[in-house]
Image (cartoon, rainbow, N blue to C red):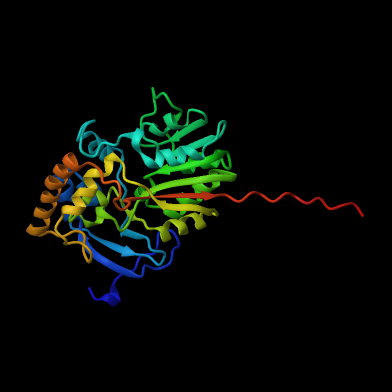
Amino acid sequence: MSDSALFVPPCPITGLPAVRLIQSLSSDLLNGLWQASFGVATAAQLGTGRRFGLWESPCGLIFFDPMIAGDGGFYRQLYTGWGKDGPWTEQTSQRMDYARAAAMVEPGHRVLDVGCGPAAFAAQVRHATYVGLDDNYPAAGAAADIRNESLATHTAAHAEEYDAVCAFHVVEHVPDLARFASDLGRCVKPGGYLILAVPKYPSRINDIPNFVFNAPPHHLTWWNEQALGTLAEHAGLQVQSLEGLPLGAHHALGHWMGRVAPKLTGEQYFRHALIWHSALAWSFIAGRLCGAILGTPRNAKPVELLLIARKPEVPPRVVPRPS
């Protein structure tokens, strides 16, 4: 297909046309990588013989097209396959995004945690009223208030009810970003905060060849500071801070995999070639060994970003004096 005939998809946030195609890749490659790397079957979702594009938008967002998100079955396979002590297991007590967000929450605040999973963040904000949302998580029997409903459904009934709305590593999984951002903003009270954590691009994670964890149907978007700021603006919020977070213990493997991986990525990130598959295997083996021996480097470059954005206060209504 000629460049002139190539369909240029719109940015999922702004709707403006993408500015460049970074690479094209096949669903067959993605399916094979998911099966080999994580033991997860994805052909039913991604299809076979289908082309995906990795695009850059004018606001700096990197996104896949088409944006096909994982369903409940995909995530059950993905997060149970390694077991509770697997190499990707997160220690919630050491998560810097949770700690920074909890510091923004005052006693008595109402907190909404979107895409909460088992509601690990609830333990960090016991002094607040916590509500978790996750339509892929079975809420029955959970200690926290987890509601098995979508953000759109919740927003329709609970607009401007929350002092803090949080989404920790959620937006990179969402296909309809414009609607999602708008709904996040609508849930925030005037004067309240939206707090988002996302993987950072570029980072060590992007140095890992064929790292399908960073591709559909898991990660649909890659984020930098400009893209996060644009998302906040789209939601009608004002950016208060936007920073890279220090690495936690659960980042050690990804950091070391990227650091020891052969330098193949940059113009491409996925390729069906022996050297690329071998480089992925090497980076996992060597990265896990380095992580076990050397731990998490203190001064390593961030692999995640944290956005804190504030909803403007509603100006007081001026009542005209009687003439």
Most distant residue in the left direction:
274
Direction from residue 25 to residue 302 in the image, left or right: right
The mark tally for this picture is 0
- Of the pair 54 and 195, the residue shown nearer to us: 195
Direction from residue 82 to residue 243 in the image, left or right: right
Query: Which residue does the image show at 18% across and 58% down from the upper left?
Result: 49
Q: Is residue 11 above or below residue 208?
A: below
**Residue 251 visible to an observer of this rendering:** yes
Q: Quadrant of the C terminus?
A: bottom right
Q: Position of residue 42 (x, y in %)?
A: 21, 46
Q: Position of residue 241 (x, y in %)?
A: 48, 52
Direction from residue 103 to residue 319 in the image, left or right: right
Query: Which residue does the image show at 20% across and 38% down from the upper left?
Result: 87
Most distant residue in the right direction:
323
- Of the pair 257 and 74, the residue shown nearer to us: 257
Query: Which residue does the image show at 14% across and 52% down from the upper left?
Result: 280
Q: Quadrant of the N terminus?
A: bottom left
Direction from residue 258 to residue 306 in the image, left or right: right
Q: Is residue 96 above or below residue 11?
A: above
